Image (cartoon, helix red, strand yellow):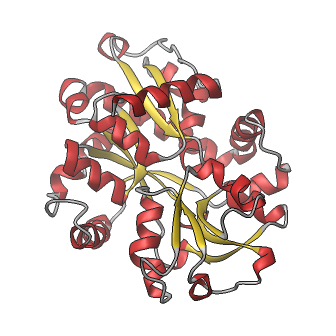
Amino acid sequence: MNSTLLNRRQYLAATGAGVLVLGLGGSAHAQAVTIRQGYQTNIWGMPTYYLLKSGALEKRGLKTEDFAVPSGNLTMQQMVARQVDMGTYAGPSLMLGHDKGGIVAIAQIETVGKTAGLVVRKDLGITKPADLKGKKIANQTGSSIGNIYVDQVLPDHGLKKGDYQEVRMDVNNMIAAMAAKTVDAMINIEPYNAIVEADGLGINIVNLEKYDNVPVFMAATPDFVEKHPDAIVAYLKAWLDIAKDFKDNPKKVSDVIYSFFTSKGYSMSPQTFAKAMGTVDVAPGFPQGLEPYMKHHAEVLLREKKISAMPDFKKLLRTDFMEKARAGA
């Protein structure tokens, strides 16, 4: 774990995602707290990136140190190791983190089912997953999307484990692998799918939205929850503040996030990025129907022996902090 964490810190330095020191206004209690914020550098993490850049945390008197990684399951691992206090990831990764390290959800931040797809190289002429038998499929192994596709979506299309070669790699390396034809397909999310399609390299043959709208949660370590409940409420108030930008000023949001990807060397038009960003629905809260959804995924994880027991959802989904944030907003 230590070497992995070191690599992630090196990645942070390499991507230029440095330390954000915030601390204007807010209560004295909140000012004393520094949140170690994890986020993934794909589009799922971009609402959090926008939060960090928006000044909303600053207005609530909070300080942060941010940790950027390629996908949320890596943030989850950092949180289990108590290297990061908060981070976003989908239900399967949340339950893995809860099982291994007591991680809890303090809010659902977004739904991202439209962002994920099984993208196949265009030159292969493949239009259905069953035709990928014997082919190489790039996957961010251990990620929520990777788990959902491997355990549920691909078997539903007649493609079970062993029928294809899984090539393990970070999502941000998959475009190069598709271009070099070292893989035949990839399980990936935006904006990488939009880039591949816009460049004529691949086509998305199975979008995840048909199977799962994929709620993404803001998770916190039990240590942070116990020590800093007031800071969590102030933090969620900042989320409610910026949710208005996503609804009422999407161009402002898009400009900030677009600059992130172009600064990392990704070449895409504003129109391609706008298409990708439009697949993310940001609405911080705790909507109805989450427990049956989470139970379904927990049953899959139990069957695959990835978690040891069915979670207690009242302990896993901490709705009380969001209720307090809304009451005091």
- Name the residue: 32% across, 52% down: 94
Task: Locate the N terminus by quadrant.
Answer: top left
- Left or right position of 182 against 97: right
- Left or right position of 203 against 233: right
176 versus 39 height, above or below? below
Of residues 167 and 74, the one drawn nearer to the viewer in this rendering: 167
- Name the residue: 27% across, 55% down: 95
- Name the residue: 28% across, 53% down: 96
- Left or right position of 203 against 93: right
Of residues 288 and 134, the one drawn nearer to the viewer in this rendering: 134
237 versus 160 height, above or below? above
Task: Locate the C terminus by quadrant.
Answer: top left
Q: How many marks?
A: 0
300 versus 129 height, above or below? above
Q: Is residue 247 visible?
A: no
Q: Position of residue 8 (x, y in %)?
A: 48, 31
Q: Position of residue 48 (x, y in %)?
A: 53, 38
Q: Is residue 207 visible?
A: yes
> In which image quadrant can residue 75 be found?
top left
Of residues 145 and 269, the one drawn nearer to the viewer in this rendering: 145
Q: Position of residue 184 (x, y in %)?
A: 67, 70
Q: Position of residue 4 (x, y in %)?
A: 41, 34
- Name the residue: 69% across, 40% down: 257
> In which image quadrant can residue 134 be found?
bottom right
Of residues 80 and 24, the one drawn nearer to the viewer in this rendering: 80
